[in-house]
Structures are given as C-alpha cells and as structure tokens.
C-alpha cells in the first residue's frame, strides 16, 4: 500500500514539473503583435480651453451715508429690487457736542443782533414817517433788518442740521434718509438697526449701508494661463456653464484681457472678463462659480487621423503607411506635416491622402488569435 502511495506522489510531482515547463515554454514564445489601422477622414477640429471663474455684476455700488449717526430704520433687505432715489434706510443723528454748542451760540448771537436791528429799524421808521430822515437812510436800515433776519434763519437751520441731520428748509433732501444711487438688486445689507455709521471723509471710507448692483449686466471673471493667452482676441465668443444651475449655459463675449500677469501657484496667469448675455427672467446670483469654454483655434473639414497614430521625433512627425495585405503586410515610415490637434485627432496638412491607411498603436493578440 505504501508503495502505491509513493508512486502516486511521484506522479503528481512529475506532472507539476511538466506543467510548469510547458507554461514557461509558452510564455517564452514570441507573441504575435498586431496593429490598429486608421483611414484619414475629413472632420472639423477645434482646440478649446476651459477657464474657471465667477459670475458677478459689472458694477457693485456701495451706498454710504452723508452724515454720521445710528441706523434708526431699515426699509430694504438683501434681494429686494430698488429704484434710483428709493430710500433704503434712515439714520438718527448723534450730534457732536462741540458743533452743537457752536451752532446754539450762533443762534443766540443772531437773535441778539436781530433784536437790536429791529429796535434801530423801528426808530428810523418813526423818524422817516415824520420826515426827519432821508429815504436813503430808511432803506439802509430796512436792508440791515432783512440781513439780520436771514442770519437768524440760517443759524436756526444750521442748528437743526447739527442736532437732527435735517432742517425744515431742506426737509425734502434730508441727509438722514439713505437713498439708492442706482436701480438694481440689493446684494447685501451689512448693518442692523442700532449700528453706528459714519460718513465718508478724508480719514476713512465711511460705513457701507447696502451694496446694490444691476443683475442684468453681468460679467464672467477668470484667469487664463500664459501659454494660451496669446491665442485670444477681444470679441471672441465663449460658452459659460454654471454647474449649480443644472449646467445652465449662457453665451458670452470676451471684452477684456489683462495686460499684466499675476502669479498663481507658481504659474503666470492673465485675468479676463467677458460680458454674459442673460435673459430678462434669468435668476443669476452674484458669485456663482462657472466654467468658460473658449475656442482657441479651429479647422473646418481638415484631413485628420487619431493622434495616437503619429510618431513625434523632435520637431518632426511621422506615420507608418500600411502596405500589402495579410502575411505580406508591411509598414512604411513617412514624414508628414501636422496642424491643429483637439487632443484626440490631429490635422494632416501634407504627406498623406484620404485613400491611404496608417498604422495605429500596437495590439497584443490573445491566444485564440494566434
């Protein structure tokens, strides 16, 4: 029994060695290499680039107060539409104590001067009625009275402006009412009721009450690499895609290319701007991320082959022409002049005709094909 077991084990070991030898022998045999073949075809080629950027209004206007104070009331919220001159907020004036004291003093002095002039005028008028003073002196006295009255009124107006931000004389043009300077959509209201605000002056830019923009006049802003900017020109069409709106597309026209590069992640890039054509009912929000597709170059009905069929050697390009059929098939190397490439197909300008076949990449034949 033991003798039979030994024979079986020996037979299994011999079979394993034999199978291994056959496997290695098959692997060592040269495999047949076949190539894909292509016939040149006429097609339209386009070289495009994709630029990432944002959609934003052409102009965003910051509405700022003309006086300092505290926000007493907000009439609008972000997203509201406003017309030019429409009130956005109301400011309650907190008067400067020095200016207030000076304005009150001016009113008191004007009042004292007016009372004295009124007394003098009454005396001159009485004498004039008695024919004791000339008409010239009488008119001069009346003129002084009118001047004193105007000074008193001006002093009172100045006091009201310092104390309340508005006077009775210019109530219709009150600086306490913050009005929109353009028609559009309110993008942001960064203040709340009770916040202190200051007007723009030499030392600061002032507090922004609201940001307003015309959302029917939008631009695409992005950056293009220096290797591609030379192929652009003002006026070329673009396709803008906004991914957040289910890949909504808009037409656009390039209108600005920056004359100066900026460095980003070690690469020089140029800013571009394009006017976006939106419909009147388009609900586009400021700041949407978008992609712009630009055609850098194109060729119509160009003779082309797959780029994988081209052999690049320095500045020269070659193809392998298919000669013969079956076992007699050979490949002849031939120089060609290439043109535009779209990344898949490449234009053949010279050296190839539409009735010739070219060799493509290698295909390793499987065991069934050999």
Image (cartoon, rainbow, N blue to C red):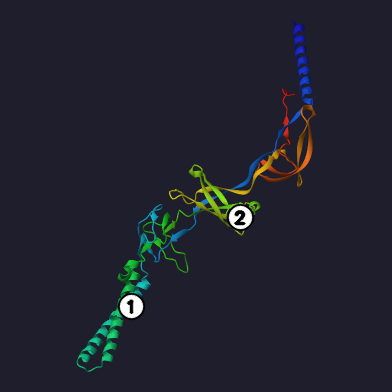
- Which residue is labeled 1 in the image? 106
Q: Where is 147 relative to 128, above or below?
A: above
Instruction: Please name the residue shown 79% across and 36% down the image.
Output: 332
Q: Are marks 2 and 1 in contact (CB under 8 Å)?
A: no
Residue 359 image point, x, y percent: 74, 35
Mark 2 or 1: in front is 2
Quadrant of the image occupied by residue 342? top right
Badge 1 marks a residue whose secondary structure is helix
Residue 71 image point, x, y percent: 37, 60
Tag shown at residue 248: none
With 153 as the anchor, is 268 left or right in this view? right
Task: Indicate which disc, 2 or 1, sits on the residue closer to the N terminus.
Answer: 1
**Disc 2 and disc 1: Cα gap in Å?**
65 Å
Residue 220 image point, x, y percent: 53, 52
* The N terminus lies in quadrant: top right
Q: Where is 160 relative to 38, above or below?
A: below
Q: Nearer the viewer, residue 126 or 91?
A: 126
Residue 310 image point, x, y percent: 73, 40
Quadrant of the image occupied by residue 128? bottom left
Q: Is residue 339 visible?
A: yes
Instruction: Please name the residue shown 45% across and 68% down the image.
Output: 201
With 76 as the anchor, is 310 left or right in this view? right
Q: Residue furthest top?
A: 1
Q: Is residue 188 visible?
A: no
Badge 2 marks a residue whose secondary structure is loop
- Which residue is labeled 2 in the image? 233
User: Which class describes the residues within 10 Å of circle 1: few (<14), some (14-19), or many (20+)?
Assistant: some
With 124 as the anchor, is 356 left or right in this view? right
């Amino acid at each position: 029994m033991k003798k039979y077991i030994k024979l079986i084990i020996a037979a299994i070991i011999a079979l394993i060695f034999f199978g291994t030898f056959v496997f290695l022998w098959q692997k060592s045999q040269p495999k047949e290499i076949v190539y894909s073949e292509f016939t040149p075809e006429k097609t339209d080629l386009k070289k495009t680039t994709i630029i990432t950027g944002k959609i934003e209004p052409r102009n965003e206007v910051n509405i700022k107060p003309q006086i300092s104070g505290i926000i007493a009331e907000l009439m609008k919220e972000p997203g509201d539409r406003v017309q030019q001159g429409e009130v956005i907020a109301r400011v309650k004036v907190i008067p400067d104590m020095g200016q207030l004291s000076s304005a009150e003093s001016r009113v008191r002095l004007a009042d004292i001067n007016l009372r004295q002039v009124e007394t003098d005028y009454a005396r001159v008028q009485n004498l004039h009625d008695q024919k004791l003073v000339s008409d010239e002196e009488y008119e001069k006295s009346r003129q002084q009275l009118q001047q004193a009255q105007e000074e008193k009124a001006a002093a009172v107006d100045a006091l009201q402006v310092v104390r309340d931000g508005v006077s009775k004389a210019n109530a219709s043009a009150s600086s306490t009412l913050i009005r929109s300077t353009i028609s559009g959509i309110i993008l942001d209201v960064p203040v709340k009721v009770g916040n202190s605000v200051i007007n723009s002056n030499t030392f600061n830019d002032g507090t922004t009450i609201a940001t307003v923009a015309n959302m029917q006049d939008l631009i695409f802003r992005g950056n293009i690499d220096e290797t591609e900017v030379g192929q652009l020109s003002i006026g070329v069409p673009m396709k803008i895609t906004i991914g957040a709106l289910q890949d909504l597309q808009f037409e656009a026209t390039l209108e600005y290319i920056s004359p100066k590069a900026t460095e980003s992640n070690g690469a020089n890039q140029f800013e571009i701007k394009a006017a976006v054509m939106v419909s009147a009912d388009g609900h586009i929000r400021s700041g949407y991320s978008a992609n712009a597709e630009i055609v850098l170059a194109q060729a119509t009905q160009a003779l082309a082959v797959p780029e994988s069929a081209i052999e690049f050697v320095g500045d020269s390009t070659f193809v392998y022409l298919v000669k013969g059929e079956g076992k007699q098939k050979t490949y002849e190397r031939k120089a060609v002049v290439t043109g535009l490439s779209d990344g898949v197909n490449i234009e053949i300008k010279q050296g190839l005709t539409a009735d010739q076949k070219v060799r493509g990449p290698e295909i390793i034949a499987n065991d069934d094909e050999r």
